[in-house]
Amino acid sequence: MKTKIHTYTSQEPMLKVNAFIAEGDNELVIVDTTLTKSDSLALKQQADALGKPVAGIILTHGHPDHVAGTYNVKQQQDIPVFATPAVKQLMLDTEQAKHAQWSGMFGEEWIPQWAYPTELVNHGDQVRIGNMTFSVLDIGAGGDCDANSVWLLEDENRAAFIGDLLYKNNHTYMNDGGILRWLSNLEVLAPTMKDYAAFYVGHGPVCDIKDFEKQRAYFLRYCSEVLKATGGTGIFNDNSRKHFEEIMLSAFPDYGCQFMVALSADNVGKELAGIHQH
């Protein structure tokens, strides 16, 4: 059976995060749940319109733009929520800080309560949700936060739900986690991922194995420009950060999430400075 996969792209303008609805013959599986009140309710409405019950919700990683909407998508229904233990732990560790950080910016659109994973799965597990089977890869800190997972749909689609492992045609958030681990994960995962035809990503259109190399090239360019802008120190001042941002925006003029360039600069610079000092 070939599952039909629907993409919901949020209307929230900064991140334009994706969520997905995998539609089987008799049920749905939702992958990630968006950030805002309006988007999560619109995602639920899209799922409801398909006229099939939701057999489960998958959370690929613990960032708010992928998990905050779970409360609204699930509501009072007894829908299992699947994630790795590390994803649940990151949510527990960061929820209150994220409320404090973002609720003022988003106002009424901010969802004040998170719904947590109810079904914990481990690396290498095969998980049956309704009539769909997913293989789980717990990829740890090698992504845009300290807890990331990849969910491989084992049917004719050869589809991979990879969260924020790749940012297709978007600047990348690198303020949590480490860039070296991320580069390593791209190398480690490539042999497995080349067997899958379509990668469903958190930001940007569906992509494929060629985008592993594009993401790697982006990281290397970003790191080299950090070192150039800071004279090899990795430490920015206001002028060097602005110059660095201009260079990166001109190098990738069609990329979205432009605010992430400067947002991640200090964190990457510190990681590179730590390497340099050793």
Image (cartoon, grey):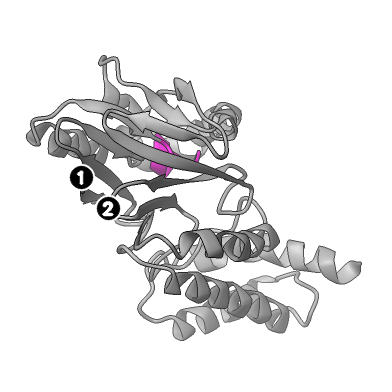
Q: Earlier in the sequence, mark 1 or mark 2?
A: 1
Residue 166 forms part of the magenta stretch: no
Q: Quadrant of residue 271?
A: bottom right
Above or below for 22 versus 212: above
Residue at 44%, 74% (x, y): give it: 210
**Percent x, y of residue 26:** 15, 30
Q: Amino acid at mark 1?
A: Met
Task: Give how far apart the Cα atoms at labels 1 and 2 are.
Answer: 7 Å
**Percent x, y of residue 213:** 52, 75
Q: Are marks 1 and 2 in contact (CB under 8 Å)?
A: yes
**Percent x, y of residue 58:** 38, 35
The quadrant of the picture occupied by the N terminus is top left
Above or below for 18 versus 171: above
Q: Judge from the rendering whether residue 188 lies leftward or rightward of residue 271; answer left or right.
A: left
Label 1 element class: loop
Residue at 8%, 35% (x, y): give it: 49
Whether residue 239 is visible to the viewer of this picture, yes or no, is no
Q: Judge from the rendering whether residue 101 lies leftward or rightward of residue 19; answer left or right.
A: right
Give the crowd class for mark 2: few <14, some 14-19, many >=20 residues within 10 Å.
Answer: few
Q: Amino acid at mark 2?
A: Glu
Instruction: Say how many tags the image has.
Output: 2
Q: Where does label 2 land, which residue?
A: 156
Residue 62 forms part of the magenta stretch: yes
Above or below for 99 versus 162: above
Residue at 52%, 79% (x, y): give it: 248
Residue toward you, 180 or 187 = 187
Q: Judge from the rendering whether residue 241 lies leftward or rightward of residue 88; answer left or right.
A: right
Magenta part of the chain: 59-67
Residue toward you, 152 or 143 = 152
Whether residue 250 is visible to the viewer of this picture, yes or no, is yes
Q: Where does label 1 land, which residue?
A: 1
**Percent x, y of residue 165:** 50, 57
